[in-house]
Image (cartoon, rainbow, N blue to C red):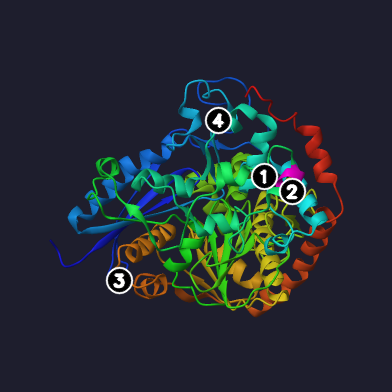
Amino acid sequence: MSPEKYTVGVDFGTLSGRAVVVRVSDGHQLAAAEHAYRHGVITDTLPGNTRSLPAQWALQVPEDYLDVLRTAVPAAVAESGVDPEDIIGIGTDFTACTMVPVREDGTPLCQLEGFADRAHAYGKLWRHHSPQPQADEINALAAQRGESWLPRYGGLISSEWEFAKGLEIFDEDPQVYQAMDHFVEAADWIVWQLCGTYVRNACSAGYKGIRQEGQYPSRQFLAELRPGFQDFVTEKLDASIGVLGDRAGSLTVEASEWTGLPVGIAVAVGNVDAHVTVAAADALEPGHLVAIMGTSTCHVLNSDVLRDVPGMCGVVDGGISAGSWGYEAGQSGVGDIFGWYVDNCVPESFQVQARRRGISLHDHLTELAGRQQVGEHGLVALDWHSGNRSVLVDHELSGVMIGQTLHTTCVDMYRALLEATAFGTRMIVETFVNSGIRVDELVVAGGLLKNHLLMQIYADVVGLPLSTVPSTQAPALGSAIHAAVAAGAYPDVYAAARRMGSRTRNAYLPIAHNVAAYDRLYREYVAAHDWFGRGNDMMRRLRRIATPEPVGASR
């Protein structure tokens, strides 16, 4: 056996899972492998079913997650060339809030006879936004009762979270609700499959499960919300809580057969993709706002002070790392918006030009947009094509483009959308700062790092130095760091992050004249943000016209 030891990190994303093999001594990534989910994101019809799903539904098949363990993990280990006997732990992270209704033994309901044609029996992906009415009810009742936990979530909880999704099942399919013994975060379900023990991670429970000071919303609150829902926590949700970086259990014989890893190695407590990335960036100290940018963006940072921050996704003691207050905010659509635009709104002539140059349409539009001066297009856009996670917490909001004329080009609009997402991040940063939370540096990880124009726009719009995380698989690296702690290689996540994580400091610095120009545009963004997002329900009215009635109990 080699004196060097290794861990495996597995990042379960929206469309695929990625596995990495990492050296424990310095965080060096030896190999990576990816497996795309066979069923992807289910938005139209269930597998083998022709009945249409309503708008804002996003489901997944949990078996797809196991396929990542069966394929990506062995592939990464094989490519790395390391002896599997030198691998001492495995850690995982997941998109959140992704929920799986299961039986007592962890079997997803959608795999059982009689449930394959019931939509509520499937995993509900983070971007399953149809429980917005339930979230509205929870928020209204919590505000009316003066629930002490509500300010910890910026005054609003999201339709993406556990209670809204659970209440949607209770309302729309009582049979599924009664049949599910546990409503499990996918982050915890995958750990359950690896080690045979159901442990709820402190991150998901705190941010998505409204768990504060060791307590969930009370039975009295839940009973007032809906008669019969009062036992949701005790009957469906609660389980022992695992500290991030702790050992949830040991790899089972069955999971060893899936992965090719040694039986008995450490399985780390589950985690959320964004929060685990802070360790990969070695950005656990206060003031470093880590933005994980992909289809959506999640913003997380540690602080040594507790504040109520309007419209945030939450503040949790130990939510990122033990000993600090972990804050979370987010934008529901970022890369998804750019992808939608390129797929639907670009003339064929630009596509031909990109093909002739042998580059992607994104790269072609980015290059053309980079030739413009700030504000030259005369546009401002709202980045709400997937709703607004922070600071409005309303997934029935939608995208807007203001200032179009007959001279407006697709390049103008593409740049305006890039800028809109940066303005959304600035709104989040300013809300933190105005609430007394220090933000000194923007740290970016994720697939959008490759767009250098976008990164410079973010530095200019936010007005902060922007650092980057060099790992192309930062969440998986973060999970591997937590696995090293769970295996006993380091005393805590802070020590492991200092050795195994890294970031390129000040990769992009704000350009003074761009900052001044964006200040003017940002004021227009704020005006549109407040008009459409606060006190005006035009977007909700339009959605009511377009959206059919919610799914019935037979689905």
Disc 4: CA contacts within 10 A as few (<14), some (14-19) or many (>=20) = some
Residue at mark 2:
138
Q: Are the two marked residues, 3 and 2, in contact with CB atoms closer than 8 angstroms?
A: no
Q: Which residue is drawn at 60% across and 39% down?
A: 348
Say which label, 2 or 4, has the lower sequence index.
Answer: 2
Residue at mark 4:
179
In this rendering, the label closer to the viewer, 2 or 4: 4
Residue at mark 1:
164
Question: For this rendering, which residue is in front, 83 or 514?
Answer: 83
Badge 4 amino acid: Ala
Q: Which residue is drawn at 85% across and 47% down?
A: 537
Left or right placement of residue 21 versus residue 454 in this view: left
Determine whether 29 is above or below 195 in the image: below
Q: CA gap, disc 3 to disc 2? A: 46 Å
Left or right placement of residue 454 versus residue 531 in this view: left
Q: CA gap, disc 3 to disc 1? A: 41 Å
Say which label, 3 or 1, has the lower sequence index.
Answer: 3
Question: For this rendering, which residue is in front, 471 or 308?
Answer: 308
Say what secondary structure mark 4 lies in.
Answer: helix
Q: Position of residue 13 (x, y in %)?
A: 47, 48
Q: CA gap, disc 4 to disc 1? A: 18 Å
Say what secondary structure mark 2 lies in.
Answer: helix
Region in magenta: 221-225
Badge 3 amino acid: Asp
Badge 1 amino acid: Ala
Quarter of the image for the C terminus: give it: top right
In this rendering, the label closer to the viewer, 3 or 2: 2
In this rendering, the label closer to the viewer, 3 or 1: 1
